[in-house]
Amino acid sequence: MSNSSNELLPLNEHLCFLFYATSRAIQRGYHQTLAEQGLTYPQYLVLVILYEHRQLTIKEIGTYLALDSGTVTPLIKRMTTAGLLRKQRDKDDERIVYVAITPQGQEKRIAMQTLPDVLLDHSQLSSTEWQQLSQLTNKLWHNLQQADSEHKN
């Protein structure tokens, strides 16, 4: 879609707003299940990525989740205090902090394995539509990250 006619777009034609509103709706849909597990949505995402990779640096977690270290560090601290994660400084460079998922964190991640089904069930999309949406959203995110990276250089 292009706005080459220089018309002012109504709100429902701003793709950024649609993604924003959809993201908020998804988080509201997830809220009850997450609250029952004592998790926030960002904490859930940390468990997902660490369950997959077992151990990452704080910087790597931030990169995967598109969050800055100022957001990731307190998140990791709370999860470590709750026994879901453990931190360890690099022996050669103490500025690097590794974060690993604990057995308790693994159990919590496994308990949340059906959370994405909430979204799928409520979306009323066919499996083909779901695949297309996922592929196009991933493509858009990748392209925007690449453009942002090129802009910074």
Image (cartoon, rainbow, N blue to C red):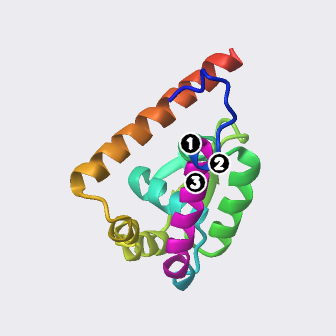
Whole-percent x and y of residue 52? 39, 53
Please tell me how crowded label 2 is: few (under 14), some (14-19), or many (20+) other residues with Cα within 10 Å. few
- Label 1 to label 3, Cα distance in Å? 35 Å
Camera-near label (1 vs 3) is 1
Marks 3 and 2 in Cβ contact (< 8 Å): no
- Label 2 to label 1, Cα distance in Å? 9 Å
Task: Answer whether residue 150 is magenta in the image.
Answer: no
First in sequence: mark 1 vs mark 3: 1
* Residue that mark 1 sits on: 15
- Label 3 to label 2, Cα distance in Å? 41 Å
Give the residue drawn at x 63%, y 75%.
82
**Amino acid beneath label 3:** Val
Give the residue drawn at x 47%, y 53%.
49
Q: Which quadrant would residue 39 be assigned to in this image?
A: bottom right
What stretch of residues is rendered in magenta? 14-34
Whole-percent x and y of residue 18? 56, 50
Q: Would residue 85 be seen by someone viewing this image from the given angle?
A: no
Instruction: Kindly state the secondary structure of the residue where label 3 is placed.
Output: strand
Please tell me whether the stretch drawn in magenta is mainly helix, strand or loop: helix
User: Looking at this view, is 101 or 126 the one in front?
Assistant: 126
User: Looking at this view, is 73 or 136 the one in front?
Assistant: 136
Which numbered tag is attached to residue 32? Answer: none
Task: Answer whether residue 23 is magenta in the image.
Answer: yes
* Residue that mark 3 sits on: 99
User: Looking at this view, is 35 or 52 the one in front?
Assistant: 35
Q: Which quadrant would residue 85 be assigned to in this image?
A: bottom right
* Residue that mark 2 sits on: 11
**Amino acid beneath label 2:** Leu
